[in-house]
Amino acid sequence: MKYLNIEDTKLKDFGALYTAKEISGQPELWEKIFEKLLREKDGISEFLDEALLTSQKIMLTGAGTSAYIGCSVEGLLQRNFGITTLSIPTTHLVSHPQDYFEKARPTLMISFARSGNSPESMAAVSLADSHIDRCFHLIITCSEEGDLANYKSKNKSLVFLLPPDSNDKSLAMTGSYSGMLLTALLIGNYKRLEGQRKIVQAIMDYGNNILGNSVIDEITKMASLDFKRAVFLGSGPLYGTAMESHLKLQELTDGEIVCKNDSYLGFRHGPKAVVDHTTLLIYYFSNKEDVLRYETDLVVGMDVGKKPLGQIGMSVKSIDKIQIDRSIAVGGGDSYDVPEEYLAVCFILFGQLLGFFKSLDLKLQPDSPSKSGAISRVVKGVIIY
């Protein structure tokens, strides 16, 4: 059996089998999540109808990778629900709860967690209950046994458990991240959930295109380049993709590749100085024309100043107006035009694959890349005061 074009016996020897299987299994996982949401839509609708009728604020929270989900979904939820929506990591909430929780403002708090055992995850929901008079909890997690899934709130709460294969065994969050992200986007459209089927099928097709042999061969070649830095750029919901890609490449290479992320417009305001001849620059392009014009302007502007080692673009369709080293178009000329925020679900595969193959290139073990044990699957050493 092959995963990511590598025999499973070799992957096991490389310490890479779990990560390879979990990356390659994501399109199938997305379909399972959609079908599970359809089966549970009555309970979800009942909970959200009350929560959204009462709440005056929505908070999206998680730690590390789980925190980045909120950055990709906050715009959709605010537009669809008409309620101020903020993405705030649990790591902010725990140290400064008074800056984010409002006692008299009813709040819907949506928590994301793979294991649900991070100290900050439990502390954040507990603090919300103690600081807000009325707080609804929607917990989206991958582990039925996790502390967060079994949290008993004095307020109304609902737990949505992703299918078991979302609970990655490897250190790096892959299927858990894209799965929770898709769940949140679909919940943002819970009143027209069945109507999202065509979108889910489209991103599955895009994902399978990224996982195809030719694209994987291209990414393997990119990973073999002698880069020391990487910068990921994205706008709107794809800014969250850039954030998660930055973390994925950095943790899978045990920090040997130093990464940054930014928006296209923000990159001009100083961060562009990081670019040098050892830098790989990755562009996640929007499929919205009014956004794309800002993004392509930045690409053209890269002709001024220090040149990166390479520039790579990920888009739905080919973009003729720019000249970069490699372009990956995941759709075709007649491909279904999915809403921009759903691209975050499938585009993250590129960041995961680049991290995976660069980890192998550096002779690390992607399933457990931290040689010193500095990072772990569930964070350790956090004391909640």
Image (tube, rainbow, N blue to C red):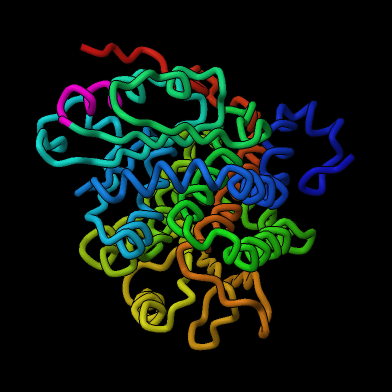
In the image, residue 178 lies at what x, y percent?
55, 47
Instruction: Indicate left or right for 348 with 302 as reference.
Output: right
The rendered magenta stretch, by its main secondary structure, is classed as: helix
Question: Vertical placement of 200 versus 24: above or below?
Answer: below
Question: Vertical placement of 116 versus 29: above or below?
Answer: above
Residue situated in front as seen by the camera: 277 or 355: 355
Image: magenta residue range: 124-133
Quarter of the image for the N terminus: give it.
top right
Question: Looking at this rendering, what residue extends furthest in the bottom direction?
Answer: 321
Q: Residue at x 30, y 49 (%)?
A: 52
Question: Vertical placement of 120 versus 384: above or below?
Answer: below
In the image, residue 308 lies at what x, y percent?
44, 64
Residue situated in front as seen by the camera: 268 or 43: 43
* Visible residue check, residue 374: no
Residue situated in front as seen by the camera: 204 or 163: 163
Quarter of the image for the C terminus: give it.
top left
Instruction: Indicate left or right for 18 with 228 as reference.
Output: right
| Quadrant of the image occupied by residue 72 | bottom left
